[in-house]
Image (cartoon, helix red, strand yellow):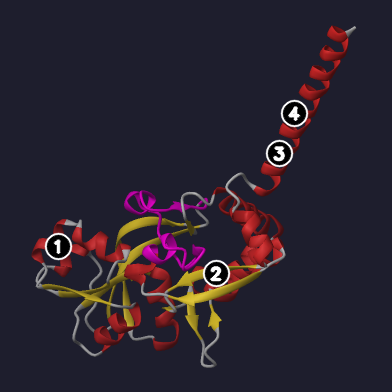
């Protein structure tokens, strides 16, 4: 009889433990074993780091409000998670350090996915494709990379535009490659004649030129690149939740509406 009671107790314990394991496993599926999504839901917000001089992706309007393509996408993703999207201005060449140092929760700012960056952070699934093009003044256009031989070219420091130029064979033939803190400074120096050309995302240069109409766009680009949202490697469940939100936006047409708002004249 003692043996039977002992066996029954052991079976009950095993069932209890199995039930507990299944319950923990189910909770992990919902909130993620890393706790990153759970923290965001508990806090009620996440913080997006960005270079706020990067129109039309993310910048400040005349009232000092954050606006742009990625701003609207981040706000919509937050709405779908039931939380608030907050934004923090960062220097682009140090933004990954801010992410890894937990000063921000993500980088949603037209960030190109590269092997070098993937060693430091993880990315959402690619949500957009973009190219690095040459911009020059209308009266002195450069349409091919080879035409930059002997010229002074501007890029944003830490950008994939800088990397694209430095890794191209034309780099050795440039008169000078000047690096700036942001793309606005690059474009202003280009218009002022202090640069012969600039290399940057077609988004940024193209959007700037919609109102200025002072620039020429090359027919040849340095690279075709994919954009992703940057996360800390360990924040898997949070990243997966943002992936899901982006997929839903694309499926229900919200992504296309936001795209048309900011890029309509560039993509039509």
Residue 31, x across and y down, in percent: 67, 49
Specify start and end residues of the magenta stretch as a single range.
96-125
Q: Earlier in the sequence, mark 4 or mark 1?
A: 4
Is residue 153 rendered magenta in the image?
no
Q: Earlier in the sequence, mark 2 or mark 1?
A: 2
Residue 82, x across and y down, in percent: 72, 65
Q: Earlier in the sequence, mark 2 or mark 4?
A: 4
Q: In percent of the image, x 78 and y 31: which residue is there?
A: 19
Label 2 or label 4, whichever lies nearer to me, is 4
Marks 3 and 1, how far apart at CA: 55 Å
Q: In percent of the image, x 9 and y 73: which residue is there?
A: 175
Q: Which residue is mark 3?
A: 24
Marks 3 and 4, how far apart at CA: 10 Å
Q: In percent of the image, x 69 and y 37: which residue is there?
A: 25
Label 2 or label 1, whichever lies nearer to me, is 2
Marks 2 and 4, how far apart at CA: 38 Å
Q: Which residue is mark 2?
A: 47
Is residue 114 rendered magenta in the image?
yes
Asked if 198 appears above or below 1 in the picture, the reply is below
Label 2 or label 3, whichever lies nearer to me, is 3
Badge 4: few (under 14), some or many (20 or more) residues near its Cα, within 10 Å?
few
Q: Which residue is mark 1?
A: 171
């Amino acid at each position: 009889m003692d043996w039977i009671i002992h066996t029954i107790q052991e079976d009950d314990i095993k069932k209890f433990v199995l039930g507990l394991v299944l319950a923990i496993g189910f909770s992990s599926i919902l909130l993620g074993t890393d706790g990153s999504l759970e923290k965001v839901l508990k806090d009620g917000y996440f913080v997006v780091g960005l270079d706020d001089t990067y129109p039309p992706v993310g910048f400040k309007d005349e009232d000092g409000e954050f606006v742009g393509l990625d701003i609207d996408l981040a706000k919509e993703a937050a709405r779908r998670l039931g939380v608030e999207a907050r934004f923090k201005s960062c220097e682009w060449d140090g933004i990954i350090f801010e992410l890894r140092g937990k000063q921000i929760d993500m980088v949603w700012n037209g960030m190109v996915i590269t092997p070098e960056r993937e060693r430091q952070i993880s990315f959402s699934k690619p949500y957009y494709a973009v190219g690095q093009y040459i911009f020059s003044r209308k009266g002195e256009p450069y349409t091919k990379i080879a035409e930059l031989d002997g010229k002074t070219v501007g890029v944003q420091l830490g950008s994939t535009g800088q990397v694209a130029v430095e890794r191209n064979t034309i780099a050795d033939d440039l008169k000078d490659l000047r690096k700036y803190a942001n793309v606005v400074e690059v474009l202003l120096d280009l218009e002022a004649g202090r640069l012969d050309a600039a290399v940057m995302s077609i988004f940024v240069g193209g959007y700037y030129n919609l109102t200025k109409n002072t620039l020429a766009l090359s027919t040849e680009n340095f690279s075709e690149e994919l954009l992703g949202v940057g996360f800390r490697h360990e924040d898997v469940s949070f990243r997966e939740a943002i992936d899901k939100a982006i997929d839903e936006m694309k499926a229900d047409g919200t992504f296309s509406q936001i795209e048309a708002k900011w890029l309509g004249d560039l993509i039509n």
